Image: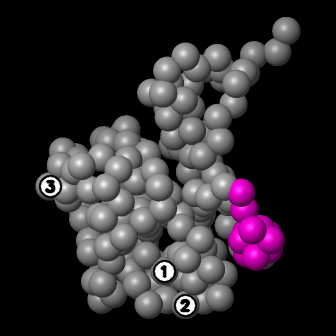
Amino acid sequence: MNLIIGITGASGVKLGLKLVDLLPSHIKPHLILSNSAKITLQYEDNQDISAITNKKNLVLYDDDQIWSDIASGSYKADAMIITPCSMNTLAKCVTGISDTLITRAFSVMLKERRKIVLSPREMPYSTISLENMAKLSMYGVVIAPPVIGYYSKQQTLEEMENFIIGKWFDLLDIENNLYKRWIGK
């Protein structure tokens, strides 16, 4: 499976990077970090790009590499997730602005009718952002903000993060056991 992962400058870059680290080895991750994501990573975690991941099959792109293979519909990417997704990136996606590799890859995935998950990271949502999310949802994009489910009784931040990432993996059809699933009584 070829998975495109876009990480924008919204708070929570570390959660996007953890998603990459938890991917099974049979998934080939194509990671795009926006310039703002690099700044946020430095600010929130005091890390730079060199500390990102040790995945052997990772393909790393700069957001200005618009000529990359993943910017073409002829590249067979299976799915894409943008996490965290800034409101700026969300607005570009809904209006078709493709001025970065993240937004270009999104536009290609949308026109090819491939699976896309967006994880908007903001609180509270403005009416404009909610309208943008509703519009993208009507186009078939899955809107999945990082929200925990208390039924799995997470006790630590790591368990909460694993719950969120596990739910994203479910949406991307990636098998996982990252969280305790609901079992009715």
Amino acid tagged 3: Ser
How busy is the neighbourhood of tag 3: few (under 14 within 10 Å), some, or many (20 plus)?
few
Asked which secondary structure carries label 1, the reply is helix
Left/right placement of residue 130 relative to residue 53 reads right
CA gap between label 2 and label 1 equals: 7 Å
Residue ID for mark 2: 97
Of 121 and 82, which appears nearest the observer? 121
Residue ID for mark 3: 50
CA gap between label 3 and label 2 equals: 29 Å
Asked which secondary structure carries label 3, the reply is helix
Q: Quadrant of residue 32?
A: bottom left
In percent of width and height, residue 139 lies at: 74, 75
- Above/below status of 66 relative to 76: below
Q: Say whether marks 2 and 1 touch (CB < 8 Å).
A: yes
In percent of width and height, residue 21 lies at: 32, 42
How busy is the neighbourhood of tag 1: few (under 14 within 10 Å), some, or many (20 plus)?
many
- Above/below status of 174 relative to 184: below
| Residue 4 seen in this snapshot | no
